[in-house]
Structure formats: structure tokens, C-alpha cells
Image (tube, helix red, strand yellow):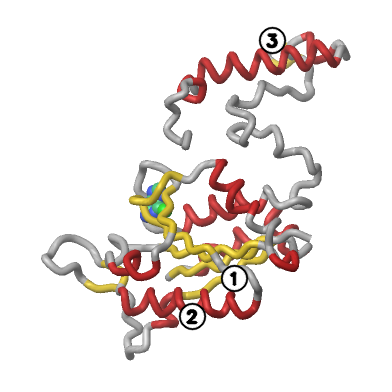
């Protein structure tokens, strides 16, 4: 059985409470397809005041996460996961300076779990920043994969880490009811188009009718309509996906 385990390092583990206890993720955790462990970086602050941040050398706004708190925290968690399970964990550091996350990267992270020795699965260590960021030496020493979820600024990596956890966990076989349900998702490898328009009852609402082709039972015609609709919607809403210079093409 394939599984993915996430070790999340954060100053605010409470942010994840309801995220982990609802819906698809809760079910996947109950069925042991996914595991999420939370570590509070503050627990690695040995001083009396549990200091984890400090002002930047040279001045400037905000506070930075201290290298001598973050590095031992990550090393301990990596070592712990290394003894508990055979695979080498991958370390992701959440920062707006990171490489942009996308579906291909999610697929690659989930796929690690399939090749895990003894079927133990993939292990991902997610390091969430807060404040103005990390002391540069955190990345120098740990050589993480630096990851961002988009070109906007969040208060910290936690919401970004939740996005990555969701995108990866739903690719684990068995997590979604229907094994096929993500194979044709937008942005998955082999599909560069947006989903087609979809409708459910009622057939007419405020004068807007469901396209007749979807209700006539001709499955070949329905398939053709859906493919054309996908292409047209992509052209209208996300023309960049149709261009070969798409920024995530690597
Ligand atoms: Cl990973 N962190 C923060 N603070 N802001 C972000 C982000 C990460 N990705 C996009 N914006």
C-alpha cells in the first residue's frame, strides 16, 4: 500500500487542527494512506524565553527565524524520520522566493511513495517560515527544495503547506473514492486543458438551460462536446496554458 507522510515544522501547529480533522484528509489519515505530524519549532528553543526569531543584521523591518533554532529542529526531525522509515525524506522549505509549485511537482512528490522500499512510502518534511523569513544560512546548510505557491505574500508558509499537502495527498491511490478521478484533472501530466463546463439538476434555472447534448444520452457526442468545451474554455480563460512558453514547462 502506498502512503505519504508529511512532517510539518511550524511555529503555529494549531493552524492545522481543523484542516486535519475534516473531510477527505481526515478520511485518508484514518485509513492510513496519509500521515501528518506536527512539530513546533519553538520546542527547539533552549533559552528561557524560547526565542525563535531575531532582528536582521544591517537593520530593516521585521524579524528572521534564527538559524540555530531551525537547523537543529529540521535535523532532529529528518533523523527521526530516517530511523523510523527506510526512505530518505525530502525537505521542502516554504518561502516566497521558492520555485513555483504546480501539478507536475505534486505528481512527482506523490510518486516517491510508490517507489518506497518495502512500500513504506514517501516522506516529506515541510518547513514553514514566518516573519520576514529565514536566516540565509538555513538554506545554505540544509539545501532544501525551496517552494512557493504563487506570486503573492502570505504571513507564513502554513497555508502554502496546506495547499501542497492537499495537492499531493489526493494523488495517493485510494484517497479519492474513484481511482480514475484525478487522471484527467486539469494541469495533470497529459492534460493541459481546463475542465469542461458541468451541470446538474434542475435542467432549467432562471431561463438558463443545460446544453441539450448532455441530456440526449449519446455518449460519443457528449465526449466530443466536452473536449471542444474544454478547449474553448481554456482559450477564453487561460490562453497561457495553450502557449508553449508556459512558465511551468520544464
Ligand atoms: Cl511558501 N510563503 C509565504 N510567506 N508567502 C508565500 C508563499 C510561501 N508562497 C506564496 N506566497
Which residue is at a point 54% across and 46% down the rendered structure image?
A: 105
Distance, label 3 to label 1, CA atoms, is: 50 Å
> Which of 103 and 54 lies nearest the eye of the viewer?
103
Q: Nearer the viewer, mark 2 or mark 1?
A: 2
Label 3: which residue? 207
Q: Earlier in the sequence, mark 2 or mark 1?
A: 1
Q: Crowding near pointer 3: few (<14 within 10 Å), some, many (20+)?
A: few
Residue 111 placement, left or right of 93: right
The tag earlier along the polypeptide, 3 or 2, is 2
* Distance in Å between CA atoms under marks 2 and 1: 14 Å
According to the picture, the residue beneath numbered tag 1 turns out to be 37
Q: Is residue 111 above or below residue 65?
A: above
Q: Quadrant of residue 157?
A: bottom left
Residue, disc 2: 76
Return the x and y of residue 62 as percentages of the image width and height: 23, 63
Which one is nearer the viewer's eye here, 45 or 220?
Answer: 220
Q: Quadrant of residue 128?
A: bottom left
Q: How many marks?
A: 3
Dot 3: element: loop
Amino acid at each position: 500500500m502506498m502512503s505519504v507522510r508529511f512532517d510539518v515544522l511550524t511555529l503555529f501547529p494549531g493552524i492545522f487542527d481543523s484542516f486535519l480533522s475534516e473531510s477527505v484528509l481526515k478520511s485518508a489519515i484514518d485509513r492510513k494512506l496519509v500521515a501528518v505530524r506536527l512539530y513546533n519549532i519553538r520546542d527547539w528553543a533552549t533559552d528561557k524565553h524560547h526565542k525563535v526569531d531575531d532582528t536582521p543584521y544591517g537593520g530593516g523591518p521585521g524579524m528572521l527565524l534564527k538559524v540555530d533554532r531551525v537547523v537543529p529542529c529540521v535535523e532532529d526531525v529528518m533523523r527521526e524520520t530516517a530511523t523510523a522509515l527506510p526512505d530518505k525524506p525530502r525537505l521542502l522549505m516554504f518561502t516566497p522566493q521558492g520555485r513555483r509549485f504546480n501539478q507536475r511537482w505534486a505528481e512527482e512528490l506523490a510518486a516517491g511513495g510508490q517507489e518506497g522500499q518495502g512500500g513504506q512510502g514517501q516522506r516529506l518534511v515541510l518547513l514553514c517560515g514566518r516573519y520576514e523569513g529565514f536566516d540565509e544560512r538555513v538554506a545554505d546548510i540544509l539545501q532544501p527544495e525551496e517552494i512557493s505557491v504563487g506570486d503573492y505574500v502570505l504571513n507564513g508558509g502554513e497555508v502554502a503547506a496546506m495547499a501542497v499537502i492537499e495537492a499531493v495527498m489526493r494523488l495517493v491511490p485510494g484517497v479519492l473514492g474513484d481511482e480514475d478521478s484525478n487522471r484527467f484533472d486539469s494541469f495533470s501530466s497529459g492534460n493541459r486543458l481546463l475542465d469542461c463546463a458541468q451541470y446538474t439538476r434542475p435542467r432549467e434555472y432562471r431561463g438558463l438551460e443545460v446544453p441539450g447534448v448532455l441530456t440526449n444520452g449519446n455518449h460519443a457526442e457528449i465526449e466530443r462536446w466536452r473536449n471542444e468545451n474544454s478547449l474553448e474554455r481554456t482559450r477564453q480563460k487561460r490562453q497561457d496554458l495553450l502557449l508553449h512558453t508556459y512558465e511551468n514547462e520544464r
